[in-house]
Amino acid sequence: MDLSFLYVKDDYILHGSQHYINECYSSAIVCFTQAVKENKKKVNAAALLYRGFSYAAMGDHKNAIKDYDEVEKTGEKLFEVFYKRGISYFFLQDYAAAHENFLKSIAISQSPEQRENIDRWMSKLKTELSKEIMNKLQNASSSSTSSNTTQSVMFKPTWDQDANFIYLNLEALSSFDTKATVVKIEKRQVSVEYKSTQVYTLALCNAILPDQSRKEFVGDTRLKLALKKEIDNFNWINVDKNKASESNSFQQSYPSSSKKKKDWDEVEKDIQKQLNAEPDEEGINTLFKQIYARGDEETRRAMIKSFQTSGGTVLSTNWGEVKEKDYEGKDRPEPPKGQEWKKPEY
């Protein structure tokens, strides 16, 4: 059985997907970027979309939106574009743009699951908009009651990471006096006081080492923090503890927004039915290629792991079964008679 399409060396989308699944987002971005370069004549919408997912998983929502914009120009995957772009705008606190994209995604949604996901984000959006409106009203009230009111500082946060550090960038919406600014870095929290008033607090998703962390003021409009991870080589899903569950749900939806659970018994019956209808080897290969191409993240993940780690002796579409298997160790199947184990060359 020729399933070499799982091993194609220049299938950068496949390799990028594997890196994404393993939470190696930087490597995934490199692969998806190469896929775009390899297909210069026609924009590769899938590569751009998945690269956008990878940027978003790293918290780089600005670059994610750039990729979603490019995908929209192709006219493909529009639901994913509007839905994911709305989420990125939400994290950038551009709630008007988020609302616009969620409305567009509702208009072309095709399943109850998609609409439920959008409704959940619209509820979050309404909550944040209410807070924003209240803050504006309170600020306006404060400034009108006293002309001598001390100017406050508002920060817009972005973040990135490498193996050892979380890099938190706080961009002020207006200039501020750095000498009147006190930064407190604790094991699970970062806070900023300005003129003895706390203006920013962030509950961290994971623990850091405060004594190995550092801060730096860039001019009078930016504060940069390098937060030393307590555990090196541990990939943070989000820097904000309060948004960790949202990022996780976003990540798990890649590359499909549907959360509908598959009936794997039915899938296997369908596969067997098609195998009986197309018993020749070419037909089997075509079938598995179609399953892989049309499958969701868990289907692809199961096929890749089972086939590659078992040396080509197991091919499963059931991630619930495959994820706990160690085909290279304790669950290793017996090789066909007359053959021996050999690691595949990529």
Image (cartoon, rainbow, N blue to C red):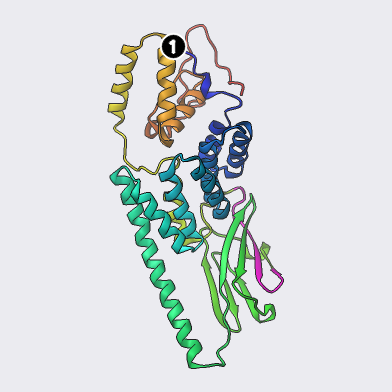
How many labels were placed on the picture? 1
**In the depicted structure, whether residue 222 falls above or below residue 152:** above
Q: Which residue is mark 1?
A: 282
Dot 1: few (<14), some (14–19), or many (≥20) neighbours within 10 Å?
Answer: few
Q: Nearer the viewer, residue 174 or 345?
A: 174
Residue 44 pos. (x, y %): 55, 35
| Displayed quadrant of residue 7 | top right
The kind of residue on which mark 1 rests is: Glu
> What's the residue at 31%, 27% (across, down)?
267
Quadrant (top left/top right/bottom left/bottom right) for the C terminus: top right
* 89 within the magenta span: no
Residue 337 pos. (x, y %): 48, 7
Q: Nearer the viewer, residue 233 or 99?
A: 99
> What's the residue at 63%, 35% (across, down)?
37
* 230 within the magenta span: yes
Residue 23 pos. (x, y %): 54, 43
Residue 246 pos. (x, y %): 43, 55
Instruction: Tell me which segment is drawn in magenta.
Output: 217-233
Secondary structure at numbered mark 1: helix
Q: Would residue 253 be seen by someone viewing this image from the given angle?
A: no
The residue furthest top is 338
